[in-house]
Amino acid sequence: MTTMTEAGTSHALRDALGLLKDREHVAERLLESSAKHSFDPDKELDWDAPLEEGKWFWPPELVSLYDTPLWKRMSEEQRMELARYEAASLASLGIWFEIILMQLLVRHIYDKPMDSAHVRYALTEIADECRHSMMFARMIKKGGAKVYPVSKINHNLARVLKTVSTTPGSFACTLLGEEILDWMQRLTFPDERVQTIVRGVTRIHVVEEARHVRYAREELRRQMVTAPRWERELTRLSSGEAAKVFSIAFVNPQVYTDVGLDRREALAQVKASGHRREVMQTGAKRLTDFLDDIGVLQGPGRRLWKSSGLLA
């Protein structure tokens, strides 16, 4: 429901979180932040430095099998190899997701005024995502791992999504892909147990991704106030379905085979793991609280979110 309130001489939009900020004002602030806090990973990070003996590629507590019976039977070397492969799997997922996001942003601004700060910031974010994708690919190669693509069905589902997604659905999916990984990376970059190059990559991503989250949140709030009812309902369903896909695709099961584990046993233990469930729900909580506040987690869509395991 749209509520209009007076804000000076103009009208502003309000939702359950309060008054929405002017779109141009938000973009101008984000452009200022981009000018001060943007990084060139090729120059910022020491890619030629050797990897450090005995350091992890991902915090062990964030590895999918952590604290399972299978984890307890694994050698420390095998655990560290799994962490290395899962870091590569997450980086691969990040590249896939950011390529989708760049296309969604281009679609979003296609009909917008090209001289606006809103469009200029979207183009700035696209440039950020280009650098992030190249950075993730370089990190995979630096770690001696391989790219772990998503399944063919998810690859093709995303092809449909980026072609037909409505604007609020696009921004809801954007936040789904950004906020859970962001939470994990905020735990990773200060962790001295982790390889310096991985900490550097996650630090850059966290700093720049904070702007992307702000842009997406502000725009989703606006869309959930102004979009027609059918589009809001579609957003609730599509975001719930996206949550199910995302939770399944989060770690490519090939990583278990690559470290010599039985894939079916590993997947069963991850699914049964209370620790893993807590990690994923904690990582998603800031996002699910926000989506709940602005009316996205309602009806059948909420049930889809629950079945994804991301919503308690």
Image (cartoon, grey):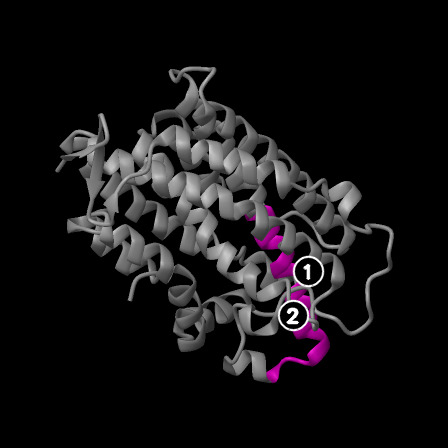
Where is residue 111 shown, x and y percent of the image? 38, 15
Q: Nearer the viewer, residue 267 or 191?
A: 191
Among the 4 quarters of the image, the one containing residue 234: top left
- Crowd class of label 1 (few under 14; some 14 to 19; many from 20; radius 10 Å): many
Among the 4 quarters of the image, the one containing residue 277: bottom left
What secondary structure is the stretch in magenta mostly built from? helix
- Is 239 on the left or on the right of 81, as rendered? left
Q: Quadrant of the N terminus?
A: top left
Q: Are marks 1 and 2 in contact (CB under 8 Å)?
A: yes
- Is 214 on the left or on the right of 223, as rendered? right
Identify residue type, mark 2: Asp
Q: Which mark is residue 27?
A: none
The stretch of residues the image draws in magenta is 73-93
- Crowd class of label 2 (few under 14; some 14 to 19; many from 20; radius 10 Å): some
Identify residue type, mark 1: Arg
**Magenta region includes residue 86:** yes
Where is residue 102 shown, x and y percent of the image? 51, 31
Q: Closer to the N terminus: mark 1 or mark 2?
A: 2
Where is residue 199 shown, x and y percent of the image? 68, 60
Residue at image coords 56%, 40%: 33
Where is residue 114 shown, x and y percent of the image? 46, 15
- Is 243 on the left or on the right of 145, as rendered? left
Q: Secondary structure at mark 2?
A: loop
Q: Nearer the viewer, residue 230 or 285?
A: 285
Residue at image coords 74%, 64%: 195
Among the 4 quarters of the image, the one containing residue 279: bottom left
Residue at image coords 82%, 62%: 51
Q: Quadrant of the C terminus?
A: bottom left
Q: Secondary structure at mark 1?
A: helix
Q: Which residue is mark 1?
A: 199
**Magenta region includes residue 183:** no
Q: Which residue is mark 2?
A: 191
